[in-house]
Amino acid sequence: MTDTIFAKASGAGQAAVAVLRLSGAATASVVRRLAGRLPEPRRASLRRLRDPGDGEVLDQALLLWFPGPASYTGEDSAELHLHGGSAVVVAVAEALVRLGCRPAEPGEFTRRAFLHGRMDLTQAEAIADLIAAETAAQRRQALRQADGALARLYGGWTERLTRILAQQEAAIEFEMDDLPTDVADRAREAAAALAAEITAHLADGRRGERLRDGLSIAIIGAPNAGKSSLLNALAGREAAIVSPIAGTTRDVVECRLVLAGVPAVIADTAGLRATIDAIEQEGVRRAIKRAEEADLVIGAFAADAGPDAETLALLRGAPETILVATKCDLGAPPVLERSATMIATSAITGEGLPALRAALEAAALRQAGLGDAPFLTRARHRAALEEAAQQLDQARSAPLPELAAEGYRAALLAIGRVTGRVDVERILDSIFRDFCIGK
Ligand SMILES: Nc1nc2c(c(=O)[nH]1)N(C=O)[C@@H](CNc1ccc(C(=O)N[C@@H](CCC(=O)O)C(=O)O)cc1)CN2
Ligand SMILES: Nc1nc2c(ncn2[C@@H]2O[C@H](COP(=O)(O)OP(=O)(O)OP(=O)(O)O)[C@@H](O)[C@H]2O)c(=O)[nH]1
């Protein structure tokens, strides 16, 4: 019999109401000892909670009873909605321990939901993403995944692969019996179609992962180009120091932005120039590194000075770039030969800033926006699906039918690791470790 676990499911700190969640086989008897007879399933009922030892009233609480398997975890569970004071929560928690319950590990409720088949691993991970979601687009992606969009997609692939494997094994039997058959060919065709679908799913430009992790944007340019002023204007606060002294920004200054529902971190960096100042050199090194790792690089130059070679060179390696001619209040921006997007801005008059924001939002939607098909959201899924596609390719060209079957089996295992249908124990810990207690 599994332990009966409990945890405060509502947030830390003082609040009007604290929700304690319980799950496990002893839930019904524990609740009866604490609150009297069980209420109707899933109906809130106001109860006095009493200390099981001396009968002292601990709180006046709302009680909910969820008999398994129709509960979040799939087990008998209950919720106690207490007054939020810490002494109330502690008193009830102590009573629960005396009644044989134990505090839950992080993610343990959702882990139990998975173990009872209430959801697959992509859905369990989506619950964690939903709790962490900070923007509308993140919420939508997590909700879609929690609703089973990836579970259905990958589950469908698992079913098809199982059939392919069965066909291949039948083909081996037929061959041993010297029966003529085209079953192996049919398996190979089905595997080719599946491999193509998996490859297309992998080639999503990492949009789902970008939306989950946030977009990285770097502002680079010569000293005094107006980078810090640009960052402050975009962030709407004085995050970075602005001064007429060239070489003011040394370290990377980060600000969080939300662009069309996509979370982003925009970084102001040290002005690019050769210098003998060791600290500034390190700043330039960090600026270059940031630019190389960014999803989008803003190349800033003063309109009256024109773009510099160093900045343009760094822009060349970036996945997406926007050129910004700053200080356009001081002079007209130059006409550039290259076809790159250029936006003229002024931190003084505000000119061009809405256009820059719009360009950033368009880029964010392009790089991390939601599409019709669900996107891959985690590196864990990507690695397993890459392996599945590779195994399928190898299986299709395997010289022996037994080797082909081996490859199909390996591909099946790889996809199974994503959904948790096969070989799960090993990956469970790493997934649920990141949960908060009470979920
Ligand atoms: N108070 C409270 N709020 C919450 C949760 C919770 O557990 N408690 N949730 C927790 O994450 C989320 C809601 N998710 C839930 C998912 C399934 C079931 C559940 O009991 N499912 C049963 C019965 C469905 C029904 O009544 O029709 C089932 O699916 O069989 C409950 C909550 C968000 N809000
Ligand atoms: N007229 C005008 N001056 C600006 C504008 N933007 C920035 N400046 C001025 O240009 C100087 C440099 O601005 P910063 O934003 O500190 O430039 P930076 O590129 O971050 O400079 P470093 O930290 O040295 O790399 C400051 O004196 C700003 O006031 C603008 O749009 N118009």
Image (cartoon, rainbow, N blue to C red):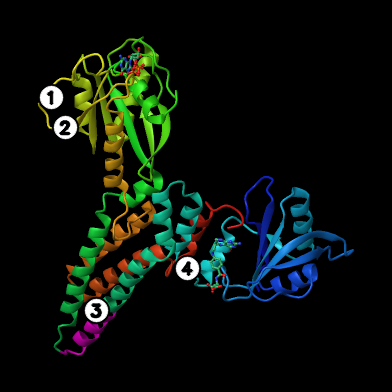
Of labels 2 and 3, earlier in sequence is 3
Q: Please name the amino acid that badge 1 sits on.
A: Leu
Location of residue 350 by image quarter: top left
Of labels 1 and 4, earlier in sequence is 4
Q: CA distance from mark 2 to mark 4?
A: 46 Å
Q: According to the image, label 2 marks what residue?
A: 340
> Is ligand 2 within 8 Å of the beta carbon of the residue shown at mark 2?
no
User: Which secondary structure, mark 4?
Assistant: loop
Marks 1 and 4: which is nearer the front?
1
> Is ligand 1 within 8 Å of the beta carbon of the residue shown at mark 3?
no
Q: Please name the amino acid that badge 4 sits on.
A: Met
User: Which secondary structure, mark 1?
Assistant: loop
Residue 264 location (% of width, % of height): 38, 39
Q: In this orientation, does residue 75 appear?
A: yes
Of labels 3 and 1, earlier in sequence is 3
Residue 389 location (% of width, % of height): 26, 62
